[in-house]
Amino acid sequence: SRPFRIAVLPGDGIGKEVMPEGLKVLKTAADKFGLNLEYRHFEWASCDYYAQTGQMMPDDWKSHLQDCDAIYFGAVGWPAIVPDHTSLYGSLLKFRREFDQYINLRPVRLFDGVPCPLANRKAGDIDFFVVRENTEGEYSAVGGKMFEGTDREIVLQESIFTRIGCDRVLRFAFEMASRRARKHLTIATKSNGIAISMPYWDERAAEIGKEYPGVTTDKQHIDILSARFVLTPDRFDVVVASNLFGDILSDLGPACTGTIGLAPSANLNPDRKFPSLFEPVHGSAPDIAGKNIANPIAMIWSGALMLDYLGRGLTGAAQKPYLDAHDAIVKAIEDVLVQGPHTPDLGGKASTSQIGDALSKVL
Amino acid sequence: SRPFRIAVLPGDGIGKEVMPEGLKVLKTAADKFGLNLEYRHFEWASCDYYAQTGQMMPDDWKSHLQDCDAIYFGAVGWPAIVPDHTSLYGSLLKFRREFDQYINLRPVRLFDGVPCPLANRKAGDIDFFVVRENTEGEYSAVGGKMFEGTDREIVLQESIFTRIGCDRVLRFAFEMASRRARKHLTIATKSNGIAISMPYWDERAAEIGKEYPGVTTDKQHIDILSARFVLTPDRFDVVVASNLFGDILSDLGPACTGTIGLAPSANLNPDRKFPSLFEPVHGSAPDIAGKNIANPIAMIWSGALMLDYLGRGLTGAAQKPYLDAHDAIVKAIEDVLVQGPHTPDLGGKASTSQIGDALSKVL
Ligand SMILES: CC(C)[C@H](C(=O)O)[C@@H](O)C(=O)O
Ligand SMILES: CC(C)[C@H](C(=O)O)[C@@H](O)C(=O)O
């Protein structure tokens, strides 16, 4: 069978430093598990490229990525030369929309060896997924301003929820919950305050839920749900949320486990019509870029999620070597987090590349 | 001078149990500090009233409350007989809007004697305020549905930000920060994802900030800001946020200090054209109602905030006995949290009324 085609976009800042470590571990895994991966490297989707050309990507960017199975993405942004809005809308957010990556999947896990900001929690206690809608909802550029410059000035911002958009993310989350041991889905909402879109979201969740009688659910308003991420993070299994609420919960979750610098993220087009994108949650971190001290674990873990996706997906038949490679990389991360070496963010002195080496070695 | 007029609305469930304790402590404080308070008691704004009359409040509710200085509010909601939407929109949310209580002020404090879900934090470390916009923004009933019942079904929900609405809450927050020791204001936003309303919010914050050169500010996106409530809660002084973001942060903050059951809230109309409302953050808690075990501290602390407001406010001349009474009640809460007695939520066996007695005694 043909190799899986992976587009490699390191992006900016520490993206360029963690990417080689991600590729290093993928190469070790490919050798060990007999994976068939083929790479295409691109230097665009970066502020460097913008500085040279005045745009984040070439006009024909789509044709380069379209027939890839996955995009392995470092981090984008360099506010000193390009406003965040320009760099994000010109790359990452464009991919999410134009490749219809309607699922943003983020694991929340507590590891031994990582200081946890919550008291009395140990590895194993916290292990859940946030499933975020990634294309519509509260993130829209629709709206406008009226009575500009006067006391009557008013700004309208539209949130847009479509039945298709709601149903597919809800179905993905129910499907995922139905395959897990606890089979529990938490539905984030705010239908007691946001009077039109959120009751609709609840309605669609109830409707899709009928297809999954084996999944138990609870519906929680985002205010108390955020509180419960701190108070009872052990209770969650799969949490599904709109674009904005998912954005908040998928930063808050890793904060609660002390893994905000380690967290990976998958931007999926589960229909596999377009490439899916795998990226660390952390950004380009201009403050520590160029020092070879960035922790590459989020990049490496994102690579593991990519293998899992390539080998499984909701529709395709499972390819065991890919799933095994995912599990082995996550296991290697667990081991290295306990035994070291550690980069400075975890109190160690190791360099970025030493972590990649250590992980490849225990794999 | 005339007494301050306070409307007393116990509401539902534990609201009816904690209210007498709130009034008990206020009476003790009034005797001790020579406060001039006058009460008007109402049984409406409750689901009991709804069960009898089919509405949450009498038609002439406004005329009863309009000339009060403050509303002391228990908790509303009894989902078994009235849907939350009906009970909330028919009372609490109506007061906030019709009395233009555009500030929702919520202290976040860590106390000795209260188990903190965060590791390695001690009383004094966490002590800040969330200032929430309370009338507009993401909470609106404007929008609608189209192509109903088809695959094209789409729901639009409007967020509405007015210049007046933004400026007054921002100014209140800057003013408040300017009077505190650290003089720091954190501005919650999400202008990197929500493309129209949030950049406008940022713009207004920058504009109002010019009036307060002595206040330092930082602007944080809501995702990372939520994370920082968990990671570095000691860094905050005053946090200002839109209606939705403020709702989230003012539950998340107390969750981080373990005080979600103790947290008070002030819904202010700082112009004093309308009564302000003081209420516990907790709800009516049907599961523990009727057992005399609810912790009345949130109600009592809300009463202290009410005295502070009556005695100070942004415009009126300060009346020291009221401010002193506020400080004394908060101090009494601190003492009782350390030495007990405690209600079951804090691991004790005391009843609701025993807490009120204990607090009155140490006052
Ligand atoms: C009950 C609900 C509508 C309300 C809100 O979101 O404002 C509550 O969460 C609060 O914070 O007072
Ligand atoms: C950078 C920003 C627009 C983005 C988002 O809000 O989606 C980021 O926070 C994320 O979660 O990937």
Image (cartoon, coloured by chain):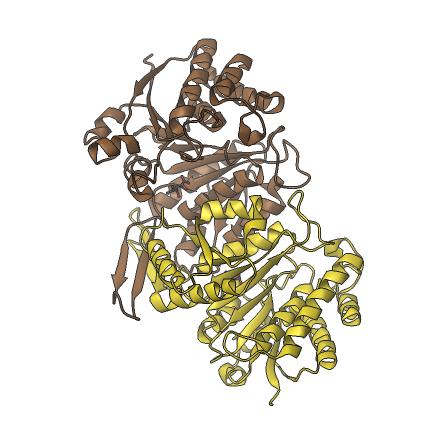
Chain colours: A brown, B yellow
Q: Is residue B22 visible?
A: yes
Residue closest to the eye, A46 or A334:
A46
Total residue callouts: 0
In the rendered image, the quadrant that contains the N terminus of chain B is: bottom right
Q: Is residue A289 above or below residue A321?
A: below
Q: Is residue A24 above or below residue B66?
A: above
Q: Residue at x 42, y 35 (%)?
A: A285
Q: Residue at x 53, y 68 (%)?
A: B87
* Residue that lies at the very extreme toward the front in this rendered image: B214
Q: Is residue A359 above or below residue B83?
A: above
Q: Does residue B310 appear left or right of residue A206 in this picture?
A: right
Rendered image quadrant of residue A168: top left
Q: Does residue A332 appear left or right of residue A121 in this picture?
A: left
Please provide percent x and percent y for residue A137. Answer: 36, 49
* Residue that lies at the very extreme toward the bottom in this rendered image: B1
In the rendered image, the quadrant that contains the C terminus of chain B is: bottom right
Rendered image quadrant of residue B40: bottom right
Residue closest to the eye, B150 or A45:
A45
Residue closest to the eye, B273 or B179:
B179
Q: Is residue B157 visible?
A: no
Q: Is residue B32 above or below residue B117?
A: below
Please provide percent x and percent y for residue A311. Answer: 42, 20
Q: Residue at x 58, y 37 (%)?
A: A257
Please provide percent x and percent y for residue B354. Answer: 79, 67
Please provide percent x and percent y for residue A1. Answer: 33, 12
* Residue that lies at the very extreme toward the left in this rendered image: A59
